[in-house]
Amino acid sequence: MKEITLGVGLAIEIALIIATILIISSHLRKNSRNNTNIQLNEQYYKSLFEENPDAIFIFDLNGKFVVANNAVSIYGYSVAELIDKPFSGFVLPNDLERVTAHFVEAVEGTATNYECSILDKEGQQREISVTNIPIFVNEVIDGVYTIIKDITKHKKAQHDLMEAEAKYRSLVENSLVGVYIMQDGKLVYVNPRLCEMSGYKCEELVGLNVSEFIYPEDLALVNENISKRFNNEIGTIKYEYRAIRKDMSVITFELYGSKIVYNGKEAIIGTVIDITERKNTEKMIKHMAYHDQLTDLPNRYLLREKLNEAIIASSQNNCRFALIFLDLDRFKAINDTMGHEVGDKVLIEIAERLKGCVNEKDIISRYGGDEFSILLPESGEQRAIEVAQQIITKLSLPLTFQHHELLVTPSIGITVFPNHSESLDTLIKNADLAMYHAKSLGRNNYQFFNEELNKKAQHELDMELNLRKAMEQNQFELFYQPQVNLETNQIYGAEALMRWIHPEKGIIPPDSFIPLAEETGLIIPMGEWAIRTACRQNQKWQEAGFSPITVSVNISAKQFFQSNLVEIVESALTETGFNPKYLELEITESITMDVERSITTLLELQRLGVKVSIDDFGIGYSSLNYLKRLPIDKLKIDQSFIRECPHDMNSNTLVRTIIIMAHLLKMKVIAEGVETEEQVSFLLSQGCKEAQGYLFSKPLPVSEFEMDYMQKRLEK
């Protein structure tokens, strides 16, 4: 029994020992885990402190460095150099008071965050972001834990960005072009220049739907281009459209735009330039090129374009059209007896009366001089007869000018497409032949083209024969019209003008034979004769002791484009010994239409030292886009522009435009047909210093020109 009791007690004791061991073991394991956690936390703290890329410090309550991590090296210091030193020695004076206040807040228990400037060891200013955290030990503040992040680069980038934005804003706000941003169909930004151009205040434009100021006819174009940009069909786009100003006037913009992201949403940014004045100028120049200055009717060049369009349309639609040519009978007599001013008024009145004979689809043009043409689309013989009869009736009514009653009748020729030809040039030629046939039948009637007009062709052959005979018998002479410097009133040159001295008919004016010479090709030998004669005569004057002058000779288009023009000019200069700098060749505007061929010939003439001018500038069609490429020395303003100056505002504007254009292209400019002192004053005020015309002298034969001008120059 005793042994049993002893056994139970031993078992209990053993159990207690085991339990004690387990408790001790559990306690030891717990202590071991706590120690491990402490060591782990110490490692965490050590890594966070020592490996942190930002500088970390502990300050005592007096603001002295107690501990620092190795990141302070980015400021050039070692940890040892900082310990026991106050932070105030590193802060810029301007920031010290604010930094101290933040430190005091941390000492008093409030964490703070701020930015300031310090100096690194090399004395360079560094921008930093500072976080101060109070250190509590047993619920008492024992120091301040400080983390600083170097934001120097960030601040510089921020400063650069602000500076760039300021520059951009200044550039945009003061730009000479309009700038806008559009989002959801509305303007969300506009610069002052756009407001100025549109007449709106900025606050009025912002929020306005673009459709509210776009010209209605251009709205579809604008919307289409906006859609293309938003759909990434195109990148940057350039196009023109019309807009309505606040005062309801219409202006034309040239727009450059592209897609951007603005305030997190897609938008369109763009610039606009007000090109209204440029478009008006282009329109005016184009109008000048295609319209007659006196009557404002389409000229022959526009007629040719419309004729070509009519031929194409009529061929496709299997229909006809009629072409009417008319010439005013005895119009030259009006000019000769009453002067060109009355003659011009007659032409203007005739143009107005012709407008009353046709409908809106018909095209009236002044073909040249006193010749007019009328294109009647989708018309045959019957319509042409009705219009021709109406013209004869209306033009037969008397005209009254300066208390004189004038009667002007027309001679009318008619061709019908395709009956009389399917060729543009042949239609014009046949209408012209029919017109002259009407004139030959007594005037004031109309005639259709027919084969009987071969008689007219025979007449031209006879004239051609007479022209050839005139060349063989030396019936041509050169007359000279002086060209005057308006500032000094001295002549500096003369234009050589061809005259046909017929043994029976006397002086035949150039208008009577030059066109035929052009058509038959006789103008080429006649032109060569004129060049050689002018060079020879001018050389004689110089050898006789007269002061040198520039002599200008007209060159026809056919002569200009002959293959050996340059060789002819060079040969004439060599044979006569004439200095090329005193020779000027006057070409027509039509030559500028074939730019590439023209440039080659003009450069060769320039190489010889010969000057080149464009004669009668403004009445034909000059390819203004290419005019700047041509080596031209001078533009000659046609007398029809000068005639109304300075009393007619339109004439003044046209003349001023030509002078400005010539000067911008580094060309001289001379006015033809000057007849009054008022015209001289106007030309001088516009910068035109050269002129010729009846105010100074009519064209003179050699003997009279010598006596009246060359001799007087020598005496002076």
Image: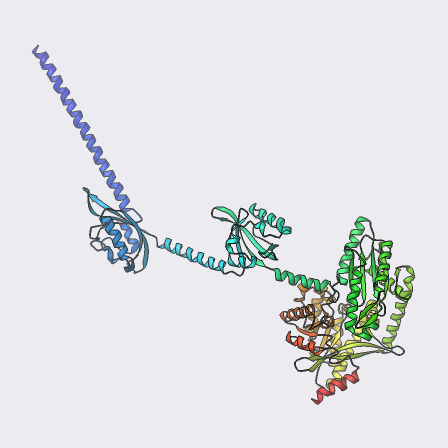
In front of the other: 10 or 329: 329
User: Could you say which quadrant of the image residue 596 lies in?
Assistant: bottom right
Does residue 148 appear in the picture of this structure? no
In front of the other: 676 or 47: 676
Q: Where is residue 285 shown, x and y percent of the image?
A: 68, 64
- In this picture the colour scheme is rainbow
**Residue at the front extreme?**
403
User: Could you say which quadrant of the image residue 533 lies in?
Assistant: bottom right
Q: Kindly identify the residue that appears in the image at 86 percent across and 73 percent down.
A: 467
Q: Where is residue 413 shown, x and y percent of the image?
A: 86, 61
In this image, 108 relative to 486: left or right?
A: left
Q: Kindly identify the residue that appears in the image at 72 percent across and 64 percent down.
A: 621
Q: Where is residue 114 shown, x and y percent of the image?
A: 31, 51
Does residue 253 appear in the picture of this structure? yes
Q: Which quadrant would the C terminus be assigned to in this image?
A: bottom right
Q: Which quadrant would the N terminus be assigned to in this image?
A: top left
**Above or below, comparing residue 125 to residue 41 in the picture:** below
In front of the other: 245 or 163: 245
